[in-house]
Amino acid sequence: MRVAPDMDHKVVFAALDRVCEDNVSALCGPSDSPYGSVTQRLVTCMKKIQEHGRALEPVVSSFTAVYHHYDLDAQTPGNGYRTLVKVLQSCLLHIIHKGRYIASNHSGAFFRAEHNASEMEAYCSALCQLRALLYLARRLLHDNEHGQLYVLQDAELSRRFVQEYSSMHKACFYGRCLGFQFSPALRPFLQTVVISMVSYGETYGKQQSGIGTAALSLLTSGKYVIDPELRGAEFERITQNLDMQFWKSFWNVTESNILSGFSRIASNPVQVNFTLTVPPVALRLPLASDPSLLTTVSPPIAHWGPGPVHMRLLSYELREGQDSEELLTLSRNDPGPGSRLPWVQKLPRSPWLLIHFHGGGFVAQTSRSHENYLRNWSKELGVPVLSVDYSLSPEAPFPRALEECFYAYCWALNNCHLLGSTAERVCLAGDSAGGNLCITVSMRALTSGIRVPDGIVAAYPATLLTTDASPSRLLTLIDPLLPLGVLAKCLNAYAGFDFQTVQPAERRGSLSALGRDTAMLLSDLTQGASNWIQSFLDPTRASAGSQSQSEKAFRRISANGTVQQNSAELIQYQDGFEPLRSECPALVQPTSCPVFRNPFVSPLLAPPGLLRGLPPVHLVASALDALLDDSVTFAKKLRAMGQPVSLTVVDDLPHGFLSLSQICKETQHASDVCVTRIREIFQLEDAKLPSPGEA
């Protein structure tokens, strides 16, 4: 259920209180209901929800009175405090909707008492945890300076935030309540991702081929479809305790031929699509201040010495230079249909060039998994796209990825004629980790004295690579795509925590074993099918398990009980309130080593001298993204310095929405916003940004 931006929270709380009263009256009154204990569960649940609602109303009022002070400007409403209120209202509206249904239909012959009780208990659990998040945010509001979203100097508060995340119950947000805060069109997709992840986690590490593991995961997912509580508990365990190699393995499934083939079918075909391997030779580039003078740019050398840089060239139209022998000698695969058809007319070189750095937490994915929107961008903009496949952590921690991206940028400037462009205007674009690299590559260009790009479009960039507390970072407790435990693993991997130097001999897809072990695959499919069928036949693994887990979780809330784990270290809440604690506490490695404060790792911490002179920066963020405050705070910093910057905040979408651009109209709109910003960089001769009202 979507929340209108201007919805009056007092109206929502009044409706919540009324629906709780109606349900308690209806369920406690004279009735011949056959549901017995289930009715009592509903009554207990509604009373608890009413208690949470009455406690939260004054807290929300305190936020709505001041949260506009934390926006970039009056025309760009968006910050973590607003987001927390929005998420809470979304939860309340779901409860109100379900409560009205129960009050009207509880005595009907077709009323599913057990299902509705479990549903309401799940949302009561979520409301309890959201109440804790609002209390934590209120503490941030009290401790921060006016208008500041981060407490960068308060290490103790950030440590307590991590401790609180580690101990708090999160499974309720991954079961029946999964994705309640996002656009309704995305919820089936999120459910598919979570079910796939927990199924994959169940088989991860077993002695099977890559495709066998994927097949077994698919066929054993039935129990997670019919048992939301089991799904939530298993997802919580996975996100808190499985190692980085699991995440790399799971995320890189998007690189498989099967999934990338679906992506290609759904996106625009392109005439040019091939990968390049550029050898590690020194480059000579003119100085920006005096083009008659040249400077040398060395190839990437961090950790294992000079090595090649891999890239992908995409172009909707075949352009001059893209079929040249000089370029094709760098190609590792088929250059695409356009270069093989002599009757395909070559267009002149474009005056524009888009250089792209992909996301994936610095640890996963490649240009291949981002092709779906890059193909569309190439068509809509009529521009060649060069996407860089930088080396990934933890095998290649900072600064290897930055060195490779900067080298690729310099190589593209020198060799734009091969890419189908004259590079009169060059734009850097990237999402998440790629957005970080767009900014830091531009900082490298500034410090090297060479030409900076004409503009940057960064979607939901990570500008502060630490676990410092902010209101939007509190969303990592409920976000299925960016939990804090996973985020911390990615950040520590990029920073080189527990790094062991390993030079990649060659690039292989995550499912490189697709062509082998056919017998193993058939065995996996057989075993997977057997387990999948058994999950439906054995009631103890399905509905009975769901009921017991749901009741068990709710009893812990009703009794206000906690799991005993370093209770002296936990934050003390007011009015006797205590959030639900997890039975499998997370182990979150703190982001405390000095490299996290390096401005080329966390550009939000860069001194003005490293940021002054950056090209226009366009930030596109989501109101429901845990990294929203990264974008808002970075935009504020640039604006305070007089640097050209714009911020667009889209609604109802999760982190990583560019990769979901073909799923629904909301994600497509967000992708269109990025295209509009890129076009402005290319078309405006003086690179002027829109006024705040237009942004």
Image: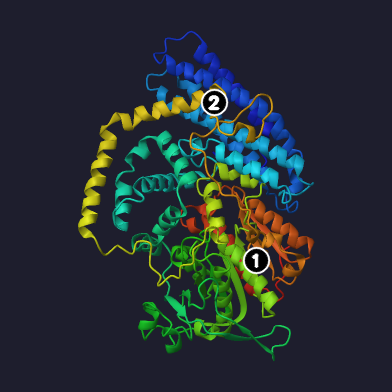
Name the mark nearer the viewer: 1 or 2. Answer: 1
Q: Amino acid at mark 2?
A: Ile
Please determine whether, in this image, residue 454 is positioned above or below residue 101.
below
Relative depth, front residue between 129 and 45: 129
Distance from disc 1 to disc 2, alpha carbons, whole Å, reads: 44 Å
Display colour scheme: rainbow
Q: Quadrant of residue 90?
A: top right
Tell me where residue 281 appears, x and y as whole percent: 52, 84
Q: Quadrant of residue 512?
A: bottom left
Outermost bottom residue: 292
**Front in this rendered view, residue 347 or 174:** 174
Tell me: 265 left or right of 165: left
Tell me, for residue 600, which label it has, or none.
1
Q: Dividing the image into 4 quarters, which one contains the N terminus? A: top right
Q: Residue at x 63, y 37 (%)?
A: 133
> Is 177 positioned to the left or the right of 73 in the image?
left
In this view of the protein, which residue sits in the foreground, 37 or 308?
308
The residue that appears at 40% across and 72% down in the rendered structure is 506
Which residue is under mark 2? 557
Name the secondary structure under disc 1.
loop
Amino acid bearing label 1: Phe
Element under label 2?
helix
Q: Position of residue 353 (x, y in %)?
A: 57, 77
The quadrant where residue 618 appears: bottom right
Quick one: label 1 or label 2, which is nearer the N terminus?
A: 2
Residue 225's disc number: none
Q: Quadrant of the C terminus?
A: bottom right
Image coordinates of residue 122 in percent, x first then y, are 49, 31
